[in-house]
Amino acid sequence: MLELYFLIISILIICVILYYQTDTEPDTTEGFDGNYLSACPSGYKTFYQSNGTAACCNGEVHGSTCLSAEQCTMGKSTHEMENCVDFILKEYKIKGKEFCPKTLPNYYEDRSKNVKGCTSGNINAQLNGPANEGQPKCMIYPTATENNARMDSCLNQRILDMYPCFGNNCTKSYIDFSQQGGSIPPLLMVSFSDNTGMHHVSYTKASAERYLDIVNPQWRQSGLNIDKNIVISEVAKAFYIDKTIAQADIQL
């Protein structure tokens, strides 16, 4: 009985030691794939909280007070303020769903350079760009004209990804007109074969409208009806694949 007593006491002592060792281990802020920040994100101002911990403010700072709701701490998250890495990644996730194509889902931005984009791989440790310069990415430009016209815009990549292929051996690609003028948007070309094996090339209605609005703003008054023109992908699909449009109802 005495040996059993000492065994129980020993086990209890070991449990108490392990408990305090675990409880006193320093807390760490979890990042995303090892992200960390050694300074406030670009565009944020540094200020210090009452406990001396550095914090970041996306707005005006008066003394130790940030006048913006967009603020975060460089230390451990608290009820009052979230850690900057977690705060920014949460914001990036929301923006990624809004702006990024599914093939390039990870949003990033560098406010000091006014650069925004999306990438297929991890973002870097500073959260302001791709982890590796060579990994696939697209750009979010400040104007609608640039987002429409630039081949590397995330808008054009989203449109390419989302447009559904049809027929057999279908492929999607852009025709780039950037050498002909900075404001001419690319045409989204859909190549496919019908059930007889005949190959066809068409252009999506949305990209054709964007293109024509720039190169021939009066095209709607010219008699061209893209809802019936066979070079438009939606019409080509209806005629060659779905068989829902008769030949008499299309423009060749």
Image: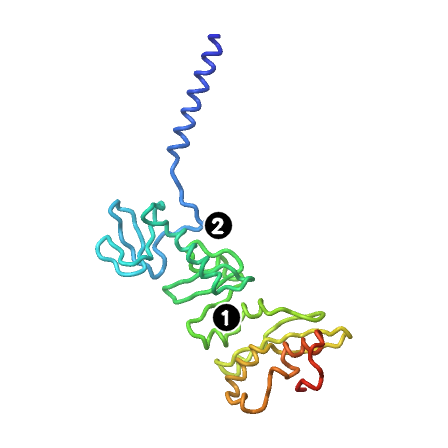
Label 2 SS:
loop
Where residue 126 sits in the image (x, y, percent)? 41, 55
Residue, disc 2:
33
- Residue 155 higher or lower than 87, as above or below: below
Q: Are marks 1 and 2 in contact (CB under 8 Å)?
A: no
- Residue furthest to the right in view is 196
Residue 153, label in figure:
1
Where residue 93 sits in the image (x, y, percent)? 46, 57
Where residue 123 sits in the image (x, y, percent)? 47, 57
- Residue 200 higher or lower than 71, as above or below: below
Q: Earlier in the sequence, mark 1 or mark 2?
A: 2
What residue is drawn where x is 44% and y is 58%?
Answer: 92
Where residue 213 sits in the image (x, y, percent)? 51, 84
What residue is drawn where x is 46% and y is 12%?
Answer: 5
Residue 220 horizontal side relative to residue 61, left or right: right
- Residue 28 higher or lower than 72, as above or below: above
- The one nearer the camera, 67 or 124, is 67
